Amino acid sequence: MTQSATAHHPPAKAVKRPGDRIFTGGTLAAGILILVVLAGVAAFLFKEALPTFTADPAEISGGAGFWSYVWPLVVGTLIASAIALVIATPLSIGIALYISHFASRKLAQPLGYVIDLLAAIPSVVYGLWGIWLATVIRPIFDWLSTYLGFIPIFAGPASSTGRTMLTAGIVLAVMILPIITSLSREVFLQTPKLHEEAALALGATRWEMVRMAVLPFGRSGVTSAIMLGLGRALGETMAVAMILSPGALIASLVQSGNQTIAAEIALDFPEAAGLRLSTLVAAGLVLFIITLLVNMVARSIVARSAIKGGR
């Protein structure tokens, strides 16, 4: 009788304590607030940029319409960010692996501390360093344009100042390196020790253990780290503005005359007014959309990596 009565009456739900309800409500409010802020930013940018989309194309900077004006900036932004990722990604992963699995503890801790310090350096300092770097690597640009000039991205004449898109990309690579390295290092350190010990017990070398156990485990985390670094590169302003000079789109990486959206806004916004101000806000809206798309693609890649990895 007792068993049948129990079967017909499921156990009562646990009563939430006031603290649990407050915490749940607070976290829900925080999540909603993020969405509200994001929607507010998008609405502000669209409202302020609307005059640019409805204006006479001849009145926009360049006289050929907004898209003709913003397209070189978009290409410059993507090129500089791509160069930064190509340089920083392998270096960051290599440094993270060395700190987490190869270096001794006495060396790993100070090396990790130095890498983290790179993230604390102001952008303007990187910009000043980039100006000096441009004078140092200018002979390399001459060599590239002379011997590899048949490749469009290295076509000459090389810049006499060295302040080119390639220089900006190198500086951006150094700026995003601590972000990717720090996050990748923490992901690699989370690899289950049993997986590493099992690989070593089967006769794998240290590198084979890293390739079979550490890298697959950290794939999604490393992808997230790379995307965060890309976000920093897309939105970087002062360092790029100090290195590059405004100009029309140039496909070569060793010529002067390229610019990015963020740097263009930083240089022209203080003196802008009227339609010019609206044009810069519209360019900011384009950068906002690019950033959102990049993050959506990144989340999709991370989700697929997590599913393949069974996590």
Image (tube, grey):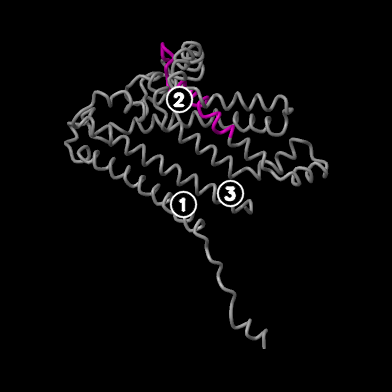
**Residue 157 sits above or below residue 237 on the image:** above
Give the magenta-colored segment's residue range: 158-182
The x, y position of residue 274, in whole percent, is: 18, 31
The residue nearer to you, when weighing 224 against 290, is: 224
The x, y position of residue 67, in whole percent, is: 28, 36
Viewer-side label of 1, 3: 1
**Residue 253 sits above or below residue 133 on the image:** below
Residue at x 30% of width, y 33% of height: 70
Identify the disc placed on residue 305. Answer: 3
- What is the residue that sits farthest to the bottom in this orientation? 1
Q: Main secondary structure of the magenta part?
A: helix
Earlier-in-chain disc, 1 versus 3:
1
Question: Is 176 a magenta residue?
Answer: yes
CA gap between label 3 and label 2 equals 33 Å
In the image, is 82 to the left or to the right of 207? left
Question: Is 132 a magenta residue?
Answer: no
Which amino acid, mark 1?
Thr
SS under mark 3: helix
Residue located beneath label 1 in the image: 27
Residue 219: name its quadrant: top right
In the image, is 58 to the left or to the right of 126? left
SS under mark 1: helix
Residue located beneath label 2 in the image: 153
SS under mark 2: helix
Earlier-in-chain disc, 3 versus 2:
2
Q: How many numbered dots are placed on residues in this image?
A: 3
**Residue 31 sits above or below residue 205 on the image:** below
